[in-house]
Image: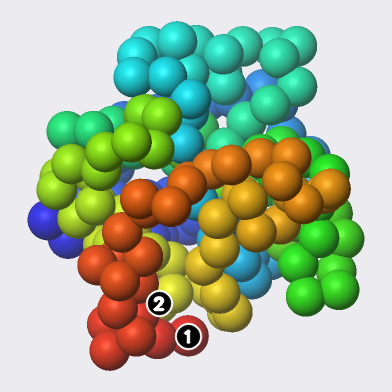
């Protein structure tokens, strides 16, 4: 599985990933951070419906299913509403400089297809943008402890191998 980014859209094996456009977004951004989330449910349809529903006031750039399928909700240069009240490295309003990746589930298990999709997507984003870091929602939410995702079982070592993920 190979992911690439062109014109702020994600392609898998040269084919545009499934689209579920979200009406919940802000202005133009230059992504510098990737924030990993989980959806809080093992359902796939509920989070996709909610994130793509006008008036929900939430969105993300991608949703990654447990089976590795990927849905793009926003172009990567558009401000998503995924981090809420947040701060990273002294900078507030993380949504204004980050890409949000929602993962189907509650953080108790991370199936290999989902892990592999996360790893390859992150690799593609590092090639396409001046990404500085990959963090969990739990790492940027204010106040600390407000959000638990992606949780202690997220396979950081498998997803963000320093030898494979290099800044642009």
Between 131 and 161, the residue placed more toward the observer is 161
Q: Is residue 124 visible?
A: no
Q: Quadrant of residue 104?
A: top left
Q: Is residue 88 visible?
A: yes
Q: How is the image coloured?
A: rainbow
> Which residue occupies 41% across, 29% down?
106
> Which residue occupies 77% across, 52% down?
144
Percent of width and height locating residue 11: 29, 51
Residue that carries the numbered disc 1 in the rendered image:
168
Residue 152 lies left or right of residue 161; in this view the side is right
Between 164 and 16, the residue placed more toward the observer is 164
Among the two numbered marks 2 and 1 on one chain, the one whose residue lies closer to the N terminus: 2
2 and 1 marks in contact (CB < 8 Å): yes
Instruction: Note whether 164 is above or below 149 in the view shown.
Output: below
Residue 124 lies left or right of residue 40; in this view the side is left
Residue 142 lies left or right of residue 153; in this view the side is right
Q: Quadrant of residue 160?
A: bottom left
- Secondary structure under tag 2 reads helix
Tag count in the figure?
2
Residue 159 lies left or right of residue 85; in this view the side is left
Between 116 and 158, the residue placed more toward the observer is 158
Residue that carries the numbered disc 2 in the rendered image:
127
Percent of width and height locating residue 150: 48, 46
Instruction: Note whether 160 is above or below 93 in the view shown.
Output: below
Between 41 and 121, the residue placed more toward the observer is 41
- Secondary structure under tag 1 reads loop
Percent of width and height locating residue 109: 26, 38
> Which residue occupies 24% across, 67% down?
158
Q: Quadrant of residue 44?
A: top left
Q: CA distance from mark 2 to mark 1?
A: 5 Å
Instruction: Note whether 114 is above or below 63 in the view shown.
Output: below
């Amino acid at each position: 599985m190979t992911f690439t980014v062109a014109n702020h859209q994600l392609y898998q094996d040269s084919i545009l990933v499934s689209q579920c456009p979200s009406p919940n977004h802000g202005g133009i951004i230059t992504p510098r951070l990737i924030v990993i989330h989980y959806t809080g449910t093992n359902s796939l349809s509920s989070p996709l419906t909610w994130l793509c529903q006008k008036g929900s006031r939430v969105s993300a750039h991608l949703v990654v299913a447990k089976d590795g399928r990927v849905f793009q909700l926003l172009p990567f240069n558009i401000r998503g509403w995924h981090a809420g009240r947040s701060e990273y490295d002294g900078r507030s309003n993380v949504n204004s400089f980050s890409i949000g990746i929602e993962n189907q589930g509650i953080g108790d298990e991370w199936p290999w297809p989902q892990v592999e999709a996360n790893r390859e997507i992150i690799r593609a984003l590092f090639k396409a943008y001046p990404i500085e870091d990959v963090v969990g929602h739990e790492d940027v939410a204010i106040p600390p402890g407000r959000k638990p995702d992606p949780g202690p079982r997220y396979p950081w070592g498998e997803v963000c191998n320093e030898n494979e993920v290099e800044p642009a």
